[in-house]
Image (cartoon, rainbow, N blue to C red):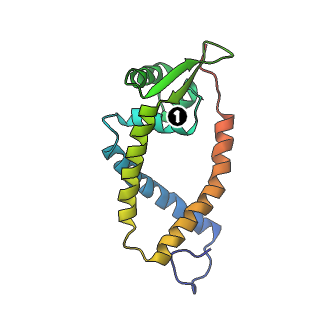
Amino acid sequence: MQLLSGASKPHASEEVCGRELLDTVPLVMRVIRNHMRRHRSGLTVPQFRTLCFVSTTDGSSLSAVAEFIGLSLPAMSRLVEGLVEQGLMDRRPCDDDRRHVRLSVTQGGQAALREARQLAQAALASAVSHLTPEQQTAVVETMQVLREVFAPEAAAADEARPHSDGP
């Protein structure tokens, strides 16, 4: 699939495609993170990332969030407690085992995330505004293809993640 170049170029090999993904995705993510950090509503970056993760995986376990953020369970527990105190997150015992907790983002937390996302999206739209309409369409189509390729792998990794929070 040729997206941002002329139709006369040959197809890229899988190796070239892999290299371009490896080189470009971190660059794009760095720009996205910078925009999101600017609009995180007074939260620390780990707090903001925690809200983002839990908002996409409602009922997350404390251990799943700790693994995603890269914190120990005790450190994640303290971070989540701060979000609970701010009214941005709910922490409730699991029905099956009260030693485990399930996390969810409150309406206030969702509003903070929505605002930050809208501001970051506007900044990204501005960044690609110089592209031709055809190039913008190609970017959208490429992102849709990448979502189709990587969403199943991400879901499988989430399923394989341990769900326990207790001893």
The residue drawn where x is 65% and y is 28% is 162
Q: Nearer the viewer, residue 101 or 68?
A: 101
Residue highlighted by disc 1: 54
Q: Dot 1: within a 10 Å radius of its alpha carbon, few (fewer than 14), some, or many (20 or more) residues?
A: many
Q: Work out whether 30 lies above or below 20.
A: above
Q: Position of residue 45 (x, y in %)?
A: 37, 37
Q: Work out whether 158 lies above or below 22.
A: above
Can you tell which quarter of the image residue 116 is in?
top left
Q: Work out whether 6 lies above or below 23.
A: below
Can you tell which quarter of the image residue 131 is in?
bottom left
Q: Position of residue 166 (x, y in %)?
A: 60, 15
SS type, badge 1: helix
Q: Is residue 24 visible?
A: yes
Q: Work out whether 47 lies above or below 164.
A: below
- Kind of residue indicated by mark 1: Val
Q: Quadrant of the C terminus?
A: top right
Q: Give the farthest residue toward the bottom.
A: 8
Q: Nearer the viewer, residue 86 or 18?
A: 86
Q: Position of residue 92 (x, y in %)?
A: 55, 19
Q: Give the farthest residue toward the front.
A: 107
Q: Quadrant of the N terminus?
A: bottom right
Q: Position of residue 145 (x, y in %)?
A: 62, 62
Count the labels in the image: 1
The residue drawn where x is 69% and y is 16% is 96
Q: Is residue 72 visible?
A: no
7 sits left or right of 118 in the view: right
The residue drawn where x is 48% and y is 60% is 23
Q: Nearer the viewer, residue 137 or 34?
A: 137
The residue drawn where x is 34% and y is 34% is 43
